[in-house]
C-alpha cells in the first residue's frame, strides 16, 4: 500500500492575505508575501487503504471525526480527482504549532498534507503545482510549500494562483505567544464577514496590492527598513479592517497591543524591529538576526518567546519502513 510522509513549516505573512475572490478554490483578492519559518513543523503521513470506505484523520494522536476530518476528506477528494483514484486514506498528522491560535497551523498542515498526499496518490507535481494544491486546503498553505520568502500571486484562476520564492535580505522573527487557545472566529468565517460587511474592504484590497509591490521591491533591494514599515502598517490595517466587520471581530488582545507598543518603543531606540499578527492575539516581530536579543529583552516577562529564521520548503521524508 502506498504511504508517504511529508514535513512543512508555518509561514508568517509580511503582506497579508485577507479576503477571497473565489472561496470555492481559495482565490485571494490580493497577492501576499511571507517568510516560511524553521520552527513549529507539521509532519503528516498519508497511507492509502484499499479496504477502507472512508478517510481517517489522526491528529496529534487522537482520531477526529468532526470538522477537521471533513476538511481533510474534501482536500483528498481534490487529490483523488487529479490522480483518478477512489482509494481512501489514513492521515496521521503531528503538529507542533499551537493549533488555530492564529499561528498559521493550517498553512503547515495543508502544505504537509499536499506533499504527502500527492506522493501517496502517485502524482508528480512541481513546486508551483504543489503550491496550487496546498492553496485549495488553506490559502496561506500555498506559501508554506516554498522555502524562505514567498510571494503568492493572486492570479485570475486556479492555474495562475500559486506561490514562488523571492530574494530577500537576512531576517529573523521572534514569535511572542500570547494565547495558545483556539480562536473564537475562524479566519474563513472572518474573511467572509469582512468581504460582506466591511465598508473598508475595497480600500484594503487596493492598498494591499500597492503594499505588495513595494514590499517585493524592498525585498529584492535588501531594504529592511522599508520592508519592516510595510509589514507593520499592513498588519494593523488588516486588524482595523477585521474590527470594522458587523458583527465586529477583534483578534488582538490588550497584551498584543502592549507588544506592538513595546516594539515601537524599541524602534525609537534605533533597533530595527516591526510587529505583525495573524488572525489571533500572538504577535510576531520581524527583525535583523543580530537584533534578536534586543527584541527578546524588550519582550522580557510578557510572553513565551520563540525565535525563527527562514525555513525549508515542504518536503517528503525518506521512508523508514524499508
Ligand atoms: O490560510 P488561512 O485561511 O488560514 O488564512 C490566513 C490569513 C492570515 O494568516 C491572517 C494572513 C496570511 O496571509 O497568512
Image (tube, rainbow, N blue to C red):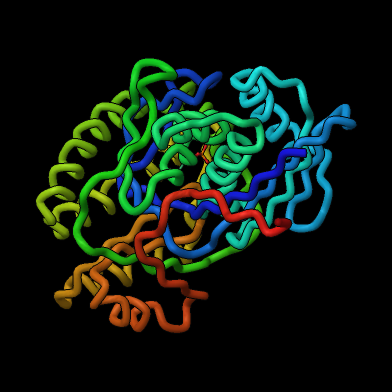
Say whether residue 212 is left or right of residue 118.
Answer: left
Q: Quadrant of the N terminus?
A: top right
**Foreground: 38 or 263?**
38
Question: Residue 40: x percent and y percent?
Answer: 53, 62
Q: Is residue 118 left or right of residue 60?
A: left
Above-or-below relation of 165 to 72? below
Q: Position of residue 235 (x, y in %)?
A: 34, 48
Q: Work out whether residue 236 can be spotted.
A: no
Residue 59's x, y, as percent? 74, 51
From the viewer's perspective, is 232 left or right of 135?
A: left
Quarter-of-image position of residue 41: bottom right
The structure residue drawn at horizontal position 73% and vertical position 57%, both measured from the top left corner, is 321
Q: Position of residue 292 (x, y in %)?
A: 31, 76
Q: Quadrant of residue 296?
A: bottom left
What residue sits 34% from the left and 79% below the top? 298
For the C terminus, give its image quadrant.
bottom right
Amino acid at each position: 500500500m502506498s504511504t508517504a510522509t511529508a514535513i512543512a513549516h508555518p509561514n508568517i505573512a509580511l503582506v497579508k492575505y485577507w479576503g477571497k475572490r473565489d472561496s470555492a478554490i481559495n482565490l485571494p483578492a490580493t497577492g501576499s508575501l511571507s517568510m516560511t519559518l524553521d520552527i513549529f513543523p507539521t509532519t503528516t503521513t498519508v497511507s492509502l487503504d484499499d479496504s477502507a470506505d472512508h478517510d481517517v484523520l489522526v491528529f496529534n494522536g487522537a482520531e477526529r471525526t468532526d470538522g477537521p476530518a471533513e476538511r481533510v476528506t474534501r482536500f483528498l477528494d481534490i487529490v483523488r480527482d487529479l490522480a483518478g483514484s477512489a482509494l481512501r486514506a489514513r492521515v496521521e498528522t503531528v503538529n507542533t504549532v499551537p493549533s488555530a491560535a492564529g499561528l498559521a497551523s493550517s498553512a503547515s498542515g495543508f502544505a504537509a498534507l499536499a506533499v504527502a498526499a500527492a506522493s501517496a496518490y502517485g502524482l508528480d507535481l512541481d513546486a508551483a503545482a504543489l503550491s496550487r494544491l496546498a492553496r485549495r486546503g488553506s490559502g496561506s498553505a500555498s506559501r508554506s510549500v516554498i522555502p524562505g520568502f514567498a510571494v503568492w500571486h493572486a492570479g485570475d484562476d486556479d492555474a495562475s494562483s500559486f506561490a514562488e520564492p523571492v530574494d530577500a535580505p537576512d531576517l529573523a522573527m521572534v514569535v511572542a505567544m500570547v494565547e495558545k487557545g483556539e480562536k473564537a472566529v475562524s479566519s474563513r468565517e472572518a474573511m467572509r464577514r469582512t468581504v460582506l460587511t466591511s465598508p473598508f474592504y475595497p480600500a484594503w484590497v487596493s492598498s494591499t496590492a500597492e503594499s505588495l509591490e513595494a514590499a517585493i521591491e524592498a525585498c529584492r533591494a535588501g531594504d529592511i527598513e522599508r520592508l519592516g514599515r510595510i509589514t507593520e502598517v499592513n498588519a494593523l490595517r488588516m486588524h482595523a479592517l477585521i474590527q470594522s466587520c458587523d458583527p465586529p471581530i477583534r483578534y488582538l488582545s490588550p497584551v498584543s497591543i502592549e507588544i506592538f507598543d513595546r516594539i515601537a518603543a524599541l524602534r525609537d531606540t534605533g533597533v530595527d524591529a516591526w510587529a505583525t499578527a495573524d488572525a489571533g492575539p500572538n504577535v510576531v516581530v520581524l527583525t535583523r538576526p543580530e537584533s534578536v536579543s534586543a527584541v527578546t529583552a524588550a519582550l522580557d516577562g510578557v510572553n513565551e518567546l520563540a525565535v525563527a529564521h527562514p525555513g525549508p520548503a515542504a518536503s517528503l521524508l525518506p521512508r523508514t519502513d524499508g
